[in-house]
Image: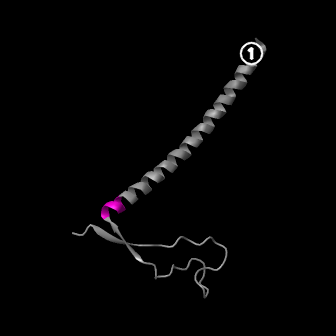
Amino acid sequence: MSTTGVMRQIAPPSSGGGGGGPAGGGGSGSAPADDSPDVEVRKADQEMINEFGRLNNKYIELDEDLIGLNVRVMVVAGWLVRRWAERSEHA
């Protein structure tokens, strides 16, 4: 059993404005040229790449949740400050 796999190197998507691919036209969304080299990736490396991707996605989700919670804490804190100010005016 081989511990190496072959993974195609894929060009990043174009930034939208302009040529639409290689010279000679090609519409938006055309496939990348098939002349990119094959890159060998060991199975262990690919597993680590996959784990990184999963963990990074989880980090992004948790970061968004944390931002939402911070907003909620700020709202409650603002309410508490206003409430405290009202009570100290009446005292």
Q: Residue at x 55, y 80 (%)?
A: 30
Q: Which residues are magenta?
A: 43-47
Which x, y percent locates residue 51? Answer: 39, 55
Q: Amino acid at mark 1?
A: Ser
Is residue 35 covered in magenta? no
**Furthest residue toward left:** 1
* Residue 45, magenta (yes or no): yes
State the image coordinates of residue 35 (x, y, percent, origin top left). Answer: 46, 82
Figure check: 23 above or below 8: below
Viewer-side residue, 63 vs 44: 44
Furthest residue toward top: 91
- Residue 40 figure quarter: bottom left
Instruction: Characterize the magenta stretch by its predominant secondary structure.
Output: helix
Residue 84, quarter of the rendered image = top right
Locate residue 33, reporting x and y percent: 50, 81
Determine the residue positioned at 64% across, 72% down. 16
Q: Is residue 32 left or right of residue 71?
A: left
Q: Residue sitting at 44 percent across and 57 percent down?
A: 53
Q: Secondary structure at mark 1?
A: helix
Q: How many marks?
A: 1
**Image quarter hosting the N terminus:** bottom left
Residue plotted at (77% across, 14% down): 90
Q: Which residue, as the protein is rendered here, is positioned at the far bottom?
A: 24
Q: Which residue, given by chain and number where applicable, does mark 1 sit on?
A: 88
The percent position of residue 19, horizontal first and vertical second, equals 64, 80
* Vertical arrangement, residue 33 with respect to residue 60, above or below: below
The colour style of the image is one colour
